């Protein structure tokens, strides 16, 4: 097994080098060995500076190159031939000279158009490379000597199955200082309780503040964009999910049926049929379309206990869900509108396209009638529309076969965690199946009943999961509008307590989330604790400030901006909050 | 059975007359017969004017008089004796003279200090009168002739059990034009679905707007008042409710246990133990107290299908819940604070103390150790504190034995529906049991661990139920801040449509909930429909308004205020919304 993994990882290192050279033709690959749990490759990047933000881009290039590779073809060459080939790469020349001296044979391995100097140890077919991930980036001296040039080292890993890769990524995440579970605990954002149950987080006041801010932001934004926000019950008769067809597909992750009186009830795994019930409670004319029904929707899925992960994978979550009921000819525009909303909401949360997230077009499989509703023409049409919308967006996306919903293809918004692991955060789905099942119609201009198209979408996804992404994205130092405590008032001594309390009250009255540190501690200790709590602003108050009716401002990075009047400080941060500025 | 009910109702009519005379000594009772489903009594109120708002007060007086009554003692008298007794009541004199003429005997019935001229037909003991309700008030001419004086008729009813009384009140409610179920349907506020299940309402966009406004109002108000708002999962392991002691008491109305893997989960009937888990996830010092943990908490109770009533009694609801963790000596102040919040929130919603709601002190029963936790001293103390707080409020309240929670006494806020039926809307409970069960402590000044007191409270109650109260209170004509649609723009003809849309966009941008009626209908039809939809303001737009850049304003009562500039209109209604004015 070790050899299998080593060969896989070493082969993936070749692929990495090929991708880097493709993206930056002046980059010079040096050595790319296998290490415990993965591999690395060192590059002389010349004048180019790359960072961990580029890892996603490199992975994408790797995925694009891979289909063009078949075997790793071996070729024995002389030193002269090898030196000629690598004449522009002084590192490879140095290696070749050493091999020449030692009398070892010199071998090249070619895959696709990429050739590397290499001792061997590869997979039989490049298509065995499937589950890989670039992890991090570091500086490393050539041959480990600080007398040599500093190279750029890219670490990665590969496994033979997705499950193993995910498990490994989870384990390094969990060990990381930046894991949302660790930060969440340190900052007191959420807790779990044995008595409540696994995968059922209790958000504390602080964690709840973040959720409430996100929730109000997206509800208000969606209403502005013509959505109707509703509340529907998070459970229903099993019949409803049998009718929708969810029951056979989701049964394994649904909670058990509850039999009471003459009813069989079950907690909902999805909101769709509830919104269908609202839609079909009235007759609709083409004039009313599109009807966009949205909800911050509690949903229940019984994930396996081994798969539960902090706030990322839980057993009861709240999805910023919606279903758009549209005439087929308007579907394309509606999907564009959804992508625009997602992209806007992401930018407000500080998630950057291409860096923090990318799009995936998840397709069905015409051959799998068990998993996907059989209607080749409808699949072709729907996939065509989604592809067209994505192309028009002028953003990178990739296609993934067999990842669609059973009722149609979808666009997934894949968020990249700092560990490199990707999670599906938000989705846009094109549904041509449910309208048939639920007989969802509208009266068209010609007075005839026509079938509607439903677009399922999650704008900022599952709130709990999005909070987890943001915790890791910001290392707990949230933008001001999301910060559970926005201002900490630090009286230097007890004498300043009264002034501190009057400042606190004014801030609180203005709706600014504020705390006073009234402990009998040194100022240094108070500042340290406020910084550990990642509070954006500290107001340091002593006799000097009190006398002049001023506040001395310090931010969580340690930057002080001297004494200012409280009204000026309040006006500044109120603007920062209202504009949701990411500092 | 008919006779039993007739006797009961006729006896209750006596009690009504006694109460009216007690409250208004100049009132003159005339006749009080039994009718189908109840009784009435006609009074000459002299110069006093009473309305349906007084019915609660009269019922209270009836309840106060009742314990002093025993039998209905019969006495045969001569006409002269009778006339002497009723010398100040010309109506009774007229009746006596008729009896005299007819040769019928004249009988008086006395109960307590109250004597009435009466043919008889009473309950054996006055204590059989238990379940009565005054229903309405009307004008009625003496002896049905318009030549006579107009009297005040008070209708009421009585039953031999609470269940029968409630059922009857439900039935008249349901038949009423003002029933929230009828208005809710007419205004499109909520729907039920056979596929979703009984007692599980789906709020439409309009109904959801009301809920969202109420929710944001109370969350913001509570945060201002020092509550922490949290989100906890609406289900937990059965163990949690066994530990809290809820399981044996609420088992019958809880949903069935869901067994999954090694866990037994159940939907929560109460939020308390979840908040206890949050409290006990950290050690707390006396400095932090009180800690007020609040939540808009989804809860599940499997009410019997016969008891389900619109939004009033449902199987899944959202409670504006909170638990205050306080040192015992601060409990009284905290309870005062809660009553202040309830009274403030009610006034914002337009509910008037004494008229729309009153307080009930619900006590335990020292003799019933099965239903109530056994600790006489603790009960005495807790009941004493609640009584003291209520007395200091200087508001009417009444005491009800055997209505407490199993863990302590409570103050119930009883809302009076238009049908006369009272429902417990909000509660404040004093709990000395749970802190023991969950070992809820704090570190006091002396460094020692002490037991906390928990105050359970619901500020604006169950949101769905409160919406039902408000629908009936306002007959669907909600105050502006709660109105699903605040402004309806009515272009007089198609020519004004462009101007109408520009006005619509400006209102929408300002966050005012607005719709345009772009149908090809007459202005009269548009006005009629907007009034039926109870939209507070209509803007009537024609060429005249467009030319002058004005809007003609009409409110839902038909009052027009002429053409004004849009900025002026917007400023006015923004103020009306922000101040939550009840027009």
Image: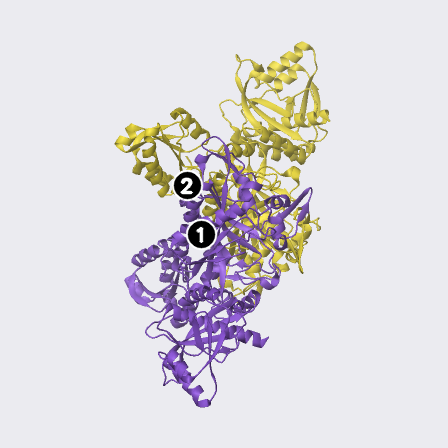
Chain colours: A purple, B yellow
Q: Mark 2 lies on which chain?
A: B
Q: Is residue B509 above or below residue B136?
A: below
The residue shown at (63%, 26%) is B13
Q: In this view, does B246 lie to the left or right of B218?
A: right
User: Residue A387, labelled with which disc?
Assistant: 1
Q: Mark 2 points at which residue?
A: B580
Residue A129: x and y, percent? 52, 68
- Label 2: which secondary element: loop
The reply to whether dot 2 and dot 1 touch (C-beta < 8 Å) is: no
- The foreground one among B400 and A581 is A581
Q: Which quadrant holds the N terminus of chain A?
A: bottom right
Mark in front: 2 vs 1: 1
Q: Which image quadrant for residue A49?
A: bottom left
Viewer-closest of B142 and A400: A400
Q: Work out which quarter of the rendered image holds the C terminus of chain A and state it.
A: bottom left
Q: In this view, does B321 lie to the left or right of B524?
A: right
Q: Residue under mark 1: which chain is it in?
A: A
Cα–Cα gap, marks 2 and 1: 48 Å
- Label 1's element? helix
Question: Foreground: B304 or B505?
Answer: B505
Q: Residue B111 carries which label?
A: none
Percent x, y of residue A45: 36, 74
């Amino acid at each position: 097994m070790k050899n299998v993994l080593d060969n896989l990882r070493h082969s993936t290192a070749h692929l990495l080098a090929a991708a880097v050279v493709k993206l930056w033709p002046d980059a010079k690959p040096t050595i790319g060995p296998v290490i415990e749990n993965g591999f690395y490759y060192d590059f002389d990047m010349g004048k180019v500076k790359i960072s961990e933000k580029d890892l996603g881009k490199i992975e994408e290039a790797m995925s694009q190159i891979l289909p063009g590779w078949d075997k790793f073809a071996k070729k024995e060459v002389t030193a002269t031939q090898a030196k000629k080939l690598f004449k522009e790469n002084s590192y490879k020349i140095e290696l070749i000279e050493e091999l020449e001296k030692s009398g070892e044979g010199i071998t090249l391995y070619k895959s696709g158009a990429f050739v590397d100097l290499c001792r061997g140890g590869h997979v039989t077919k490049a298509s065995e490379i499937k589950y890989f991930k670039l992890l991090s980036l570091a500086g490393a001296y050539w041959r480990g000597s600080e007398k040599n040039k500093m190279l750029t080292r890219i670490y990665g890993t590969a496994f033979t199955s997705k499950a193993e890769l995910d498990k490994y990524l989870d384990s390094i995440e969990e060990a990381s200082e930046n894991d949302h579970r660790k930060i969440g605990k340190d900052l007191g954002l959420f807790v779990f309780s044995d008595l409540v149950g696994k995968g059922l987080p209790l958000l504390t006041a602080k964690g709840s503040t973040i959720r409430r801010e996100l929730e109000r932001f997206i509800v208000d934004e969606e209403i502005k964009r013509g959505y109707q926000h509703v509340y529907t019950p998070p459970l229903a008769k099993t019949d409803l999910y049998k009718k929708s067809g969810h029951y056979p597909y989701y049964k394994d992750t649904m909670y058990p049926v509850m039999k009471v009186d003459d009813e069989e009830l079950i907690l909902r795994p999805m909101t769709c049929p509830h919104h269908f019930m609202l839609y079909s409670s009235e007759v609709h004319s083409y004039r009313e379309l599109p009807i966009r029904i949205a909800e911050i929707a509690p949903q229940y899925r019984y994930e396996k206990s081994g798969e539960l992960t902090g706030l990322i994978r839980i057993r009861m979550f709240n999805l910023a869900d919606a279903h758009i009921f549209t005439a087929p000819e308007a579907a394309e525009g509606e999907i564009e509108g959804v992508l625009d909303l997602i992209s806007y909401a992401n930018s407000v949360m500080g998630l950057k396209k291409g860096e923090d997230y990318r799009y995936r077009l998840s397709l069905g499989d015409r051959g799998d009638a068990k998993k996907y509703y059989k209607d080749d023409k409808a699949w072709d049409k729907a996939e065509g529309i989604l592809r067209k919308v994505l192309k028009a967006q002028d953003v990178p996306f990739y296609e993934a076969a067999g990842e669609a919903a059973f009722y149609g293809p979808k666009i997934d918004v894949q968020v990249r965690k700092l560990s490199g692991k990707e999670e599906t955060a938000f989705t846009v789905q094109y549904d041509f199946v449910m309208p048939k099942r639920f007989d969802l119609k509208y009266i068209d201009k010609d007075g005839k009943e026509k079938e509607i198209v439903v677009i399922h979408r999650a704008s900022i996804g599952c709130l709990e999961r999005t909070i987890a992404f943001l915790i890791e994205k910001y290392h707990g130092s949230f933008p001001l509008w999301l910060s559970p405590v926005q201002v900490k008032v630090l009286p230097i001594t007890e004498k300043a307590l009264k002034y501190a309390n009057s400042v606190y009250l004014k801030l609180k009255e203005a709706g600014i989330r504020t705390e006073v540190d009234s402990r009998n501690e040194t100022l240094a200790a108070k500042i340290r604790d406020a910084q550990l709590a990642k509070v954006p602003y500290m107001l340091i108050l002593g006799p000097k400030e009190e006398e002049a009716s001023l506040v001395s401002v310090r931010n969580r990075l340690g930057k002080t901006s001297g004494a200012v009047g409280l009204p000026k400080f309040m006006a500044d941060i109120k603007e920062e909050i209202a504009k949701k500025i990411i500092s």
